[in-house]
Amino acid sequence: MLLAVGLLGSLFVAVRRERHEHRANRVEIVMDDQDFQSLARSYAYDQRALLVALRRAGLTSLAVQEELGGAVSTSSTAAVYPGTTLLAQAKLSRFSDPVFAKLAANGIRSDEVYLVAYDAPTAARYTQQLALKFSPRAVRVLRRGTPTVFAIRTQADYFTTVGLGLPGDRVALAHQLGLKLVPRLQNDERFQAPQIGALLHDAAYKHDAHTVVFFGLRNQVLGYPDAIDDTARLMRAEKLNFGTIETYDPKQDQAGNQSLATALPAGTVRVQAIAKPEQDKLRPEEIVQRYDLGVRERNVRVVYLRPFGHQWAGRSIEATNVELVKEIRDGIRKAGLTVGAASPFETFVTRWWEIAFASLAVPAILLILLDLFGVRGSRWIAAFVAVDLALVLGGYAVHHDMAARKALALLAAIAFPIAGFAAIAYAFRAPRPASLGAAIVDGIQVLAIATVVTLAGALVVVGLMSTPLTMLEIDRFTGVRLVLVGSPIVALLLYLFTSRWNARVTVERLGETPVTVLQLVAGVVLVGAGYLVLVRSGNQSDIAPSTFELALRAHLTTLLQVRPRFKEFVLGFPALMLLPSLVPADRVRWGWLFALAIGVGLGDIVDTFSHLHTHLSISVLRLVNGAVIGVVIGAIAVAAYRRLRKP
């Protein structure tokens, strides 16, 4: 009864989550404007014509970065001169401009920077931005007419890093071509609510932006370190989304990223980008595939593109970039999503009573496992339920409910695969099927029983851990490696030292049993394989996949749309299929190896659903694909084994 209540509670949360995932179905395709300009200028392309072609191919937005002081020298609407430069020039010749001539006569300051705006919109922008970035005493307006001249008391090298707002000509170009604007704003650690509000209001109303992506030499979000709550509040008021950039190395995370996303869970969208040095090493097909995987499997809602500077299949560079955008757009549509302004997850709050109900599945499965080995009684039930509810309610009381939920989810993630292993213990003792057909049917039955029991654990993990932050991978389920290691090790220990699997051994018996060379080699291989499983877990690891594995992954993805996991369809599922066909001698000799393989496969089922940033339907499809391929491989293994190994 406890298990039924817990699973129903988890299912209730999972259904709500799936509805939120289904509604967040718009993906924004964004082009980095700075890199786009560099490419267009390098090859003398018509920027307007190329942007029109990209928009027709599916581009939705242009990411325009704040103009930095160091970039003013390349602008056609402004110029900047350090005081030291003007002093040197004054010694060689007179200034024709009356403002600078008068300035030279009265004394040019070496600790000032002189900024010139040649048109009224640029002058207005500089007036607004300089007031935000410098104190009133540090900025003087030497001429208010056109061209406007500002004197700013600062160091020239510092001025090069100061943001001066979004260039008006780039913003106007985006609007004229029907492209949405993605402002790239830079943080200033001195900013407080008024300055932050001015920046965001300008982006939201003047430029009609929907999503903001931050940048800067220090790689910080706006408001870091002391005004992040103000940034979140003002972004909610302006109805702006925060674009959190997907990274695999914590050192690359923007400072304050987690804090801002935590304060703005219903206004955060995942951004996927490929760094230019890495992109230059990739083939266009690999770029498309990477973005396609991000959109379908990692809830990416902003595809952040940089122009590709190489030809593809005889196309010009212009045509190559148009084709890239077109194929990314087609991939988004094939995934059942639409192209448009990025849509975040709506407010998705799991209330304490929902988690309390879902958490009851954890003591229930632990009690069932204990009951299998003779530990039972009403006092155990009362004690386990009391501890479970105390943990959940106590976590909410002290505002650390996620810590309690993670602990319970980790217990479920290990206990349910063990329960799945225990549920097919009869297969270690059952008589060998008489025919090949009966052996395959028995194998499918064993696989189905173990998978269904383990899937209940995956449902509990989803029910306990589903929040907007985990679905955006801001907050993570931290026990993945323990699940991958704990499930097979516990399965092996239970197999060896309990009687349920008909292989109970003692320490003395183990010590007296001779070790064959084949078993020793198998043990060494298993240790090495276990190490590889650990270091290869996660999205990024120090050991890269081989060329053959990458090619196999690509083919499986192309063929099945969602690639199944190797640990399931190559290891766990075939082992479950083959188990009923083993002759008694092989069960005794190799049962421990089958226990390990089954433990790895069942643990990986839970691991699949522990990637909470993956859409639930994708995880289900991944499991189905793995089960189908696993049954085929298992059937082949059963046929080969029965042919080679007679009773």
Image (tube, helix red, strand yellow):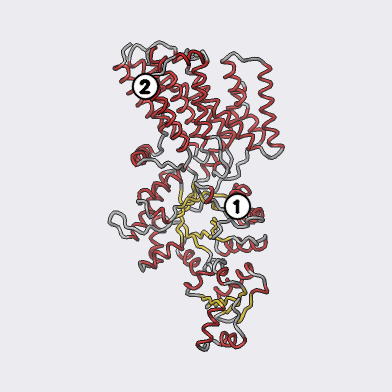
Residue 237 in view: no
What is the quadrant of residue 383 in the picture? top right
In the image, taking residue 352 as reference, residue 288 lies left or right, namely left
Decide: is 609 above or below 69. above
Percent x, y for residue 581? Answer: 37, 16
Q: Give the Cα separation between the discs numbered 1 and 2.
A: 54 Å
Percent x, y for residue 341? Answer: 50, 53
Are dots 1 and 2 in contact, CB under 8 Å? no
Percent x, y for residue 87? Answer: 55, 82
Circle nearer the N terminus (1, 2): 1
Decide: is 134 above or below 412. below
Question: Three-letter amino acid code at disc 1?
Answer: Gly
Please give the name of the residue rendered at 45% of the width and 28% of the height, measured from the top-left corner. Answer: 601
Residue at which label 2 appears = 518
Q: Nearer the viewer, residue 202 or 643?
A: 643
Q: Nearer the viewer, residue 454 or 188?
A: 188
Percent x, y for residue 536? Answer: 45, 38
Residue at which label 1 appears = 256
Please give the name of the residue rendered at 50% of the width and 62% of the height, measured from the top-left corner. Answer: 64
Q: Nearer the viewer, residue 554 or 253?
A: 253
The quarter of the picture where the C terminus appears is top left
Label 2 residue SS: helix
